[in-house]
């Protein structure tokens, strides 16, 4: 896929990894540009039903500080990873961040843009930007409070400290924590479980959840949910899923 990004598709699952071990998988501009193209490739492949981001040893240690140190405000705006992470968050398929090692700053914001976060027990997470005289700039200030609440989000961002996988689980930053021995198998099982579901139903559920999280009017969220739910009855997956249940067999979804 590129010098720093690897994309492999197996059994309806796209496995995307950052391969920059000498820098703890730090996110340079080139790394993120390659990541952006890989996301486009995965989204365009109709065979792909799940995307997993899983980098060896370290998920992503954050943005490359060497590239940022002397930027002007205008250059910093162009350097920002926000548009790529928004693209990841907006993908119709389920996305999984498999976190081992460091997930810091921009690396943690990359994980926040995914639907699921599975952490290895020895993972370390955090938002150290404040110690560099900056703040999160690729989704951290709005995705983190939405996920764990305002108070805890401010604590992590204002103090800039790292937390353990167990602490991340306790505050709802990750969905689950797995031991080193079980980590890879747990990630693969989750991806396989998601890939066996109806893609149409998952896409509708994801869209509805995301849109309703941004909608303050309860009446509109309820109406949107009903309409999106009812629309699924026009597709083959709803018929197949319900008939399979009635016939006591496993469903065979088309998408």
Image (tube, helix red, strand yellow):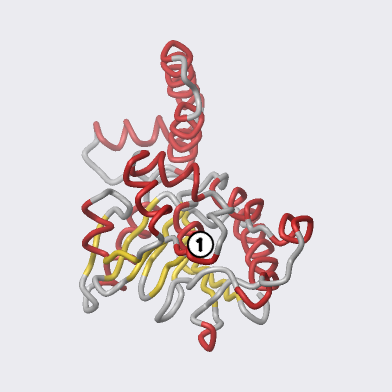
Q: Position of residue 123 (x, y in %)?
A: 31, 71
Instruction: Give above or below for 191 relative to 145.
Output: below
Provide the residue designation for mark 1.
129
Density class for disc 1 (Cα within 10 Å; few <14, some 14-19, many ≥20) is: many
Q: How many marks?
A: 1
Q: Is residue 32 above or below residue 210?
A: below
Locate residue 224 relative to residue 30 in the image: left or right: left
Q: Position of residue 243 (x, y in %)?
A: 32, 32
Q: Quadrant of the N terminus?
A: bottom right
Q: Could you say which quadrant of the image residue 30 lies in? A: bottom right
Decide if residue 39 is in sight here.
yes
Residue 13 versus residue 137 in the image, above or below: below
Residue furthest to the bottom: 22
Which x, y percent locates residue 170? 21, 52
Q: Circle 1 — which element?
A: helix
Q: Nearer the viewer, residue 30 or 230?
A: 30
Q: Quadrant of residue 92?
A: top right
Classify residue 108 as left or right of residue 123: right
Of 23 and 88, which appears nearest the observer?
A: 23
Where does residue 115 sit, x and y in percent of width and height? 42, 49
Quarter of the image holding residue 96? bottom left
Vertical placement of residue 193 versus 3, above or below: above
Q: Is residue 12 visible?
A: no
Q: Residue shown at 32%/46% (left/top)? A: 152
What residue sits 49% from the left and 57% below the top?
109
Who's the residue at 26% across and 64% down the image?
165
Q: Is residue 45 left or right of residue 163?
A: right
| Residue beneath the point at 48% across and 73% down | 61
85 lies left or right of 50: right
């Amino acid at each position: 896929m590129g010098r720093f990004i690897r994309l492999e598709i197996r059994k309806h699952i796209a496995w995307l990894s950052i391969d920059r071990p000498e820098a703890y998988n730090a996110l340079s501009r080139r790394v993120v540009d390659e990541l952006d193209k890989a996301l486009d490739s995965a989204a365009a492949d109709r065979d792909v039903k799940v995307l997993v981001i899983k980098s060896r040893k370290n998920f992503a240690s954050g943005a490359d500080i060497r590239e940022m140190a002397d930027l002007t405000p205008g250059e910093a705006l162009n350097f920002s990873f926000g548009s790529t992470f928004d693209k990841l968050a907006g993908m119709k398929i389920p996305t999984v961040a498999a976190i081992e090692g460091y997930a810091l700053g921009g690396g943690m914001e990359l994980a926040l843009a995914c639907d699921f976060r599975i952490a290895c027990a020895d993972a370390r997470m955090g938002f150290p930007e404040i110690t560099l005289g900056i703040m999160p700039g690729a989704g951290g200030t709005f995705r983190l409070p939405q996920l764990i609440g305002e108070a805890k989000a401010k604590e992590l961002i204002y103090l800039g400290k790292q937390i353990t996988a167990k602490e991340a689980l306790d505050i709802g930053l990750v969905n689950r924590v797995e031991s080193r021995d079980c980590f890879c198998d747990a990630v693969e099982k989750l991806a396989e479980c998601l890939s066996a579901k109806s893609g149409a139903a998952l896409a509708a559920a994801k869209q509805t959840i995301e849109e309703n999280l941004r909608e303050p009017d309860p009446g509109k969220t309820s109406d949107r949910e009903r309409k999106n739910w009812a629309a699924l009855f026009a597709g083959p997956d709803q018929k197949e899923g319900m008939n399979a249940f009635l016939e006591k067999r496993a469903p065979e979804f088309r998408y």
